[in-house]
Amino acid sequence: MTSEKIKKDRKKVALDQDTYEKLKTFTRFNGLKLRCTVDTLVDLMLQDEALGKQVVELSLQKQAAESDA
């Protein structure tokens, strides 16, 4: 795969600054690429039903808290 093809297969995702800093720190500390870590987190969430449900519940709580603020 050429580098142009790889770049075309990617999309930008908006993150809160605090979330980005946490992810950046975690990945750098462990010698990982941020993009690969996010890919892995998504794969885990989709493979593990309990984890997926937990992500949905916590996401809904965060969304509700943001809309109340």
Image (spheres, grey):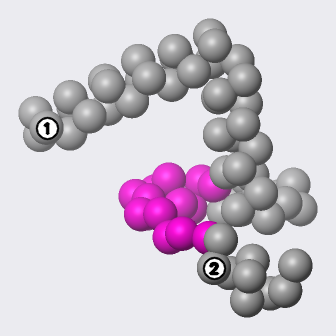
Sooner in the amino-acid sequence: mark 2 or mark 1: 2
In the image, the segment drawn in magenta is 10-23
Residue 28 is at least partly visible in this image? no
Image location of residue 48, percent across then percent down: 70, 18
Which residue is pictured at 57% across the width and 21% down the height? 52
Q: Residue furthest left?
A: 68
Look at mark 2 in the image and give the residue it sits on: 8
Q: Is residue 29 shown above or below 4?
A: above
Which residue is pictured at 63% across the width and 79% down the height? 8
Image location of residue 58, percent across then percent down: 42, 23
- Residue nearer the viewer, 25 or 3: 3
- Name the secondary structure under disc 1: helix
Q: Is residue 48 shown above or below 20?
A: above
Labels 2, 1: front one: 2
Q: Is residue 30 shown above or below 66?
A: below
* Disc number for residue 44: none
- Kindly identify the amino acid type of the residue bearing the numbered disc 1: Ser
Mark count? 2
Q: Quadrant of residue 61?
A: top left
The answer to whether 8 appears left or right of 13 in the picture is right
Q: Quadrant of residue 59?
A: top left
- Kindly identify the amino acid type of the residue bearing the numbered disc 2: Lys
- Residue 17 sits inside the magenta stretch: yes
Which residue is pictured at 79% across the width and 64% down the height? 33
Image location of residue 67, percent across then percent down: 13, 37
Q: Residue furthest top?
A: 50
The quadrant of the rendering that contains the N terminus is bottom right
Look at mark 1 in the image and give the residue it sits on: 67
Marks 2 and 1 close (CB-CB < 8 Å): no
